[in-house]
Image (cartoon, rainbow, N blue to C red):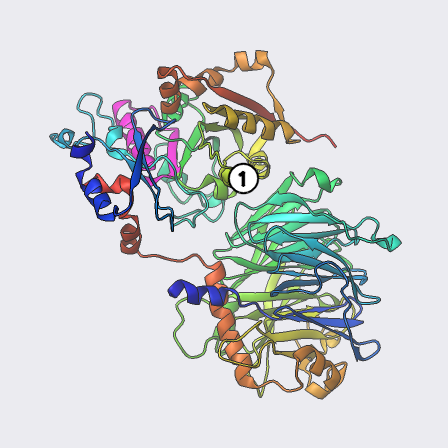
Amino acid sequence: MLASAHYETLHHLQGLSQNSYNFLWGKSARNSKVSTLKLIKLSNSGDGRRLRLRFGPGRKMLKNETNPHFSKTTRLPRKRFYRARAHSNPLSDSHFPVPISPCHVDYSLHYPQLFPSSDQTVHSKKIQFADIGCGFGGLLISLSTLFPDTLMIGMELRDKVTEYVKERILALRVENPGQYQNVSVVRTNSMKYIPNYFEKGQLSKMFFLFPDPHFKEKNHRRRVISPHLLDEYAYALCTGGIIYTITDVEELGEWMKACLEGHPMFEALRDEELEADPVVKLLSSATEEGQKVARNGGQTFQAVYRRVVPSL
Amino acid sequence: MEDGEQNKELEVAPALIAVHPTQDSVAVAVGSDLRVFNLKTGCPVQLVDDTAEPFHRDSIRAVCYGSNGKLLVTAGDDKLVKIWHTDGWSCICTVLSEKRVSAVAISNDGLFISFADKFGVVWVVDLDGFHDHQSLASKKAVPILAHYCSIITSLEFSPDGRFIISADRDFKIRVTVFPKETSDGAHEIQSFCLGHTEFVSCLAFVWDSDNPDGLLVSGSGDSTVRLWDITSGSLLDTCEVGAEAGSQGFQLSNGKEDECCPAITDLCAIPICSLVAVVIQGLSGVVLLSCNLSDKTLSITQVISIKGEAFIPTSMGTSSSSDELWMVAGVSSLQGSNSNSLARVKAISGFIKMKPDSGEVVATVLEDKDIPGGMQLLEKLQGSAEIKEEVVLAAAETLKTAMRNLLIKKQYSVEKREFRKRGRNDRKTKH
């Protein structure tokens, strides 16, 4: 498999390897289908070059009639054609358009059936649910039918993944007339631009499902739940609004819980409240990541908190 | 190679000026050099610094007097925040920052010093104990809020002290409730003031006796000055300073067709007449905006151009009661010039006679000999009694590039971005 799939890469390596390389095979913790090949240069450690290769899908599957990117049976886009890197740098400068302020968000682009005209700047109805780092959109799709009267949006930094979710929603709208009109997706860096999309107290639910763990301490500032970013989430959430977090990484689970616990504007939901909330069950079952964890028999760690008015 | 050049330009810092609230002294920072002139005694000030980290070692990026005039705070690229006592002009405390400092502010009650770093974190130093003249040697800063990895360009306390306002290069102005207990952090965001389409470069409050809470004005790289209601975050008025000054016949560039609009580099509210002085890249002079606090509008009243020499101010300062607006033009270091750390200082006078409605031209640029403190002041603050015009012009040009490199997002063409992505492994398997 190695030889056939990555002849080019190996060839490239041979070019490099006057020095001895040690090959280490490792399974990515997040995705068992994807194997990672790590190379660690042992001698001549001048620059300590380290390469990471990712295995893509086989090439023979590409042949398909009409639009190969869509499944013939379900007419939904196929995920394998929208593969992207598992991580994206949230610190880099963004090159996608960002609305100047929440009233510049064009609802007619996102929800064309509900907002036919784009001149409207004051909307009768505003987005209430935000799925931050929505990935392939599993949760949004489940929520859409569970809360048909609520506008919701997914925010995702990786452009190909956003493209997939966009196609998926469009296909679902065609397949199920009248449904899925309340969901949309946008490519953005939610760590920077939450205030550009939502007014103060606009949201009633925010979701942070299986975020990037960023294990290294120097990368903790890249985590999407952090004490300072929670201030912005508290700003966007209305009083009583709920923030849902879940992860399969124990360390991150503890971190997110500790951040929320330490914040004066969030309090934990009680067990019976968690039991009564239909959304809590979706956290581990609806998303692609959650299903993957369940398949592999993994453990999940969730933290669900309510936005409260800080006590003075 | 290109990167190396850029780094050098990045390190260029504008000369800064600050004026004591009752105009007892004027401070100018050029590079790592802090120069203070005492206007009361008419003498240059000899600074004393016995702290563990004596004097600044790298460019000073922020200079600020406390509103009671007892303190001066300086901070910059050497990650030091220095608190100077204005009585004996000694450094009473040096606070170590983890990152380079980009802005400082002192709360109106004089109890807190706040500074912001280039990673977007705002820190607070509690000055409790300072008034007993105890040693402040062990003062530590605590982080209270953060903009997500964005350079904070300006910090201000609201006149009533309830809010701390921070502006960043991501076009944002954040209004946060200043906490009672700073060690807990500032979690409650009052509003975001959104509307600028480029980095926000400067903030100021305009107020008068009828409107003690005042209104916030902000200047930006998008060439506009905007007026805000900080409680709601709503935009009250926009003044297209770049376009309007251009249409009044003032040339804003050096003749070359510039691809981007000239940025607003500094704002200064002049308390005695509800005016806002604005300096803009490429304009040899100052634009005066009048701010109508009851109608909540902002408009250009006058452009004061500097005649006889090119003088593009990099920073301005004024006291709360006196009649002069002080300006400085210069940079920390100029390449290819041995006249390092020179800066030109000028002052405009006559605001006290300017009535808000008359629009009469009264404010005038003072001749060097008429400046308070006279030639002795100029010698101290400028570094030399006479500064060549070329130095000032070159400084303005260097600074423009430096500001663009630091604060404006690099625009790559689609092709260039695709090219940069070509090495990515997920792209390799596609073809």
| Residue plotted at (66% across, 48% down) | B123
Residue B132 is situated, as x and y percent measured from the top left of the image, at 88, 53
Q: Is residue B218 visible?
A: yes
Left or right, A120 with reference to B351: left
The image position of residue A243, as x and y in percent, is 54, 27
Is the residue B307 above or below the residue A107 in the image? Answer: below
Would you name the residue on which mark 1 appears?
Answer: A199
Tell me which residue sits at (21%, 40%) in the image: A10
Relative to B236, does residue B85 appear above or below in the rendering?
A: below
The image quarter in which residue B382 lies:
bottom right
The residue range painted magenta reads A158-186
Q: Residue B211 vs residue B243: left or right?
A: right
Q: Residue at x 50, y 35 (%)?
A: A224
Is residue A164 rendered magenta in the image? yes
The chain holding disc 1 is: A
Q: Nearer the viewer, residue A116 or A215?
A: A215
Question: In the rendered structure, which amino acid carries the disc numbered 1?
Answer: Glu
